[in-house]
Amino acid sequence: MDPSKIREIIVRFRILIIGRANAGKTTILRKVCNTQENPVIYNSDGEKIDPAVLSASRERGLHDIENEMVFQNNPGFIFHDSRGFEAGGESEFNMVKAFIADRSKERDIKKRLHVIWYCIPMDESARSFTQGEVKFFSQCDTGNIPVMVLFTKFDALYDVAFAQLRKEGTSRKDAKGLAPKRVEESFANGPQLKFLKNVQWPPKCHVCLPNMNLDDADCGLLMERTAGTLDNKVLTQLFVSTQQTNLALCMKYAVERTLMKLVDSAETTSNEGHEEAIGKLGTWFPHVWAR
């Protein structure tokens, strides 16, 4: 597909985000879209939903996974939100499963689901998988839609490691610096990743997200890992060019996927060829304006 036609055909990148209550989903989405504002919610017909109506529905325990969340700061992303399955039990799980199945087979490419982010917070006392999460990875075949696990609030584990280091006699200053490394080493061989490796439907990858509530929090790794899970080159370009928080990622893919093919091309030896090459490279940076 001609890169310049990607946005005309697919238009926007669609993500389903799943997670328990207080898993940090909204915080992550705001960081991804580089905003502090709340998203605008649309129903499946594209009609804007009044926030008051939406709030009232939530109070009654109603939730529609078909609703689309769009942040005005980056309307290139469409997010669908699913509550953790512990909130809705069997019916919630079946609803999510049906939604994924329908969107994976959707004939209209604009409505297809492109990736799933499953958020699991690390600030829970047990830090273990809920029954609903076990059920998802054991029973939910997402087909060609890649699933990523996002271990949110990962910095909570730093506090645990810090306390352990202090008990071992490490100074407060050193313990603060050593805690993240200890967590990374122990988590790599911990029960969470061992579980995910042995489930029926394992995720394609995981990413640990600490301190996402801070103003200078970086979601660059999330962007990089998400791009890496996409097997479709067209979707990869759509995602990389849509995200606006990791310019280095745009540069990486522009060089590897486009520039390297143009370097030895005879088409780039003329002025017209130069302009065409610049245009092709520019498709990775649609949000950057040159003067």
Image: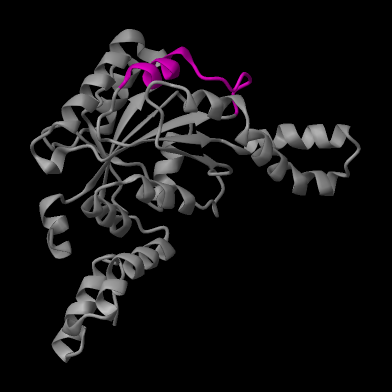
Residue at point 88% right, 44% down? 171
Residue at point 40% right, 32% down? 203
Q: Nearer the viewer, residue 45 or 271?
A: 271
Residue at point 25% right, 40% down? 114
Residue 180, how many percent across, how many down? 69, 44
Task: Give the residues in magenta.
Answer: 123-140
The answer to which quarter of the image holds residue 115 is top left
Visible residue check, residue 13? yes
Q: Is residue 83 left or right of residue 198?
A: left
Can residue 192 be found in the magenta stretch?
no
The answer to which quarter of the image holds residue 42 is top left
> Which quadrant is the C terminus positioned in?
bottom left
Q: How is the image coloured?
A: one colour
Residue 19, how many percent across, how many down? 42, 27
Return the residue found at the far right: 169
Q: Is residue 200 left or right of residue 154?
A: left
Residue 61, how many percent across, how many down? 33, 14
Return the residue found at the far left: 107
Q: Nearer the viewer, residue 290 or 191?
A: 191
Q: Is residue 49 above or below residue 255?
A: above
> Which quadrant is the N terminus positioned in?
bottom left
Can residue 126 be found in the magenta stretch?
yes
